[in-house]
Amino acid sequence: MSDPMRIRAQAQGSGAVVRVLMSHEMETGQRKDAAGKTIPAWHITEMTAALNGKVVLSGEWGTAIAKNPFTEFVVKGAKAGDKITVNWVDNRGDKRSDEAVVA
Amino acid sequence: MKAPALALAVSFAAPFGHGQTNNAPSAADGIAQYRALLADGNPAELWEAKGEALWKQKRGAKNVAFSDTCDLGKGTGVVKGAFVELPRYFADTRRVQDLESRLLSCMEAQGYNAAEIAATPFGRGEQLDLEALVAYVSAESKGMKFNLPQARPEERLMFEVGKRIFYFRGGPYDFSCASCHGEAGKRIRLQELPDLTKNPGDGVGFAAWPAYRVSSGELWGMQRRLNDCYRQQRFPFPGYGSDATIALATYMGVQGKGSVSIAPSIKR
Amino acid sequence: MMTIMTTTTRIIIPLAWVALIAGCAAAPSAQEADQATQAIMKNSFREQGIAKLDRIQQDELQQACSGEKPPSEATAKRIEAAQLATVQWPADGAFLGDWREGEKLAQNGRGMTWSDPAGVPSGGNCYNCHQITKAEISYGTIGPSLYQYGKLRGVTDPAAPASAEMLKYTWGKIWNAKATNACSNMPRFGHAGVLNAAQIRDLMALLLDPKSPVNAQ
């Protein structure tokens, strides 16, 4: 079971700024360990963000995304009290879902 | 260890106070911009969250929580403001202790074997819990000024010892801490070196650790930072939580009195 | 003994207690602090990989240069003379090697740490502290710039007799920098066995060969 995401959602103007910090190794599959063996790829493949249950952002991620990735985006029309849910799935089939309320 | 030459085309008027030779200003400004971009969304926050949970959780053979049993210098369970007064003397252990050795003492009270944890390599086993705890505890002093106590003779002795160790030259390179950190305005490759013989400024040097290191995706406490310093100085291995490391932290903390802590910060 | 006169009584206090009564903790004596430091240095380190505990047994130079203040002029001169005596000059008088190899050595910061394997040649680590070629912008400033080293010193032909003194000085610097500056920050590369004569020849070429980018660009 992976560590929880940190989600901060702040109402700003006519929307909300959402900042998400995910905990994930994001192994590219290019690295080799000390013995010379390739470390298998292990990374997020899809992520979504939803506002009150409706998907507003989706991404297909690959090996270019950094370890412990940080994502920041603005959701139009979001206001204080709305629920932001962020999901991810990785290439091993693990998944994670966390939510936060817009402040 | 070679720092990659960052040749960012963007020239950025970032404040950079050191005297620079020919090619350096644009490269250094570029790095400053890179760091500013990294500052939001510091993955250290993931460690902070984990550390807060660990602090409040009943654990170990004795099944007690740090929040009910651990005194970091400001009272049992008190975390706010503790970090900027460490290292300090503790009556129960009769030692001057830094945050990490003090957490080991508290873990021992929970039923853990402190010597085993101290011997565990960084980034493994219970050392991971220590990373989370230092991130959390330091975060609870973020923005506060360092103010290490020097009232007790033990504290003043550790300061004097720390100063001597800071200037102790050894190893095949004849390096001391002062070889790199004894003068202002110097750098190794493109990495600026804070002058640790005085207050090098808010959020700099002693005031910047623990920190998340982007290059390795790891959270380093001061113990790990000192450990890697000694490795690069070509010294033998300083024990985790050893008196030498506590003395050095005491010296740096006292010299840095009044500087604002930004820990846990983010580093390249 | 200190005598306090009050209106009604006379209190005699041993002098040794006066500092404590004065309210603040007495600072440790220099001797106390020195002894505590020795004990703590001994107890705090262990060997790891190729880094053994003899590395923190200081030689006379390291001891003399471990203070906040430098040693006296007389001590410094004595140290420099002793260090100069350790310099091993190139057997066949060939001071210069290949500047291309020298540049690789200057870039290479590996060797001698506890995470380095035994028996692998070390690098010179030069760029950590010095500017050397114009092209390399990732350089340190702990040491002076070495850019145009040979050119600035008028070494147009390293084989000429006029260049001999500068070649000797430079070799000495790299072999044992403390021979010319007792408490120099620069490691004693030759004397400490970090670099061998062949490697130092290549670094010499990097600095003094007129064709080296240090002097030609």
Image (cartoon, rainbow, N blue to C red):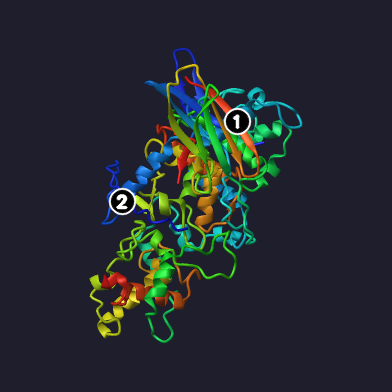
**Quarter location, residue C167:** bottom left
User: Nearest the camera: C184 or B135?
Assistant: B135
Q: Is residue C9 above or below residue C144?
A: above
Tell me, yes or no, if residue C184 can be seen here. Answer: no
Q: Chain of mark 1?
A: A
Q: State the image coordinates of residue C42 (x, y, percent, origin top left).
A: 60, 52
Above-or-below relation of B80 to C183: above
Q: Which residue is mark 1?
A: A97
Name the residue at 66% across, 32% down: B106
Q: Amino acid at mark 2?
A: Ala
Identify the residue at horizontal 40%, vertical 31% (top origin): B258
Q: Position of residue C61 (x, y in %)?
A: 45, 62
Most foreground residue, B128 or C198:
B128
Q: Is residue A20 above or below residue C215?
A: above
Q: Tag 1, which secondary structure? A: strand
Query: Can the viewer see residue C68 in this picture?
Result: yes
Mark 2 belongs to which subunit? B
The residue at the far right in this view is B61
Please state which of residues B132 and B169 is positioned toward the viewer in this rendering: B132
Left or right position of B152 against B123: left
Asked which secondary structure carries label 2, the reply is: loop
Q: Is residue B189 left or right of residue B52?
A: left
- Residue behind mark 2: B9
Residue B89 got which mark?
A: none
- What residue sits 45% from the left and 43% below the top? B267
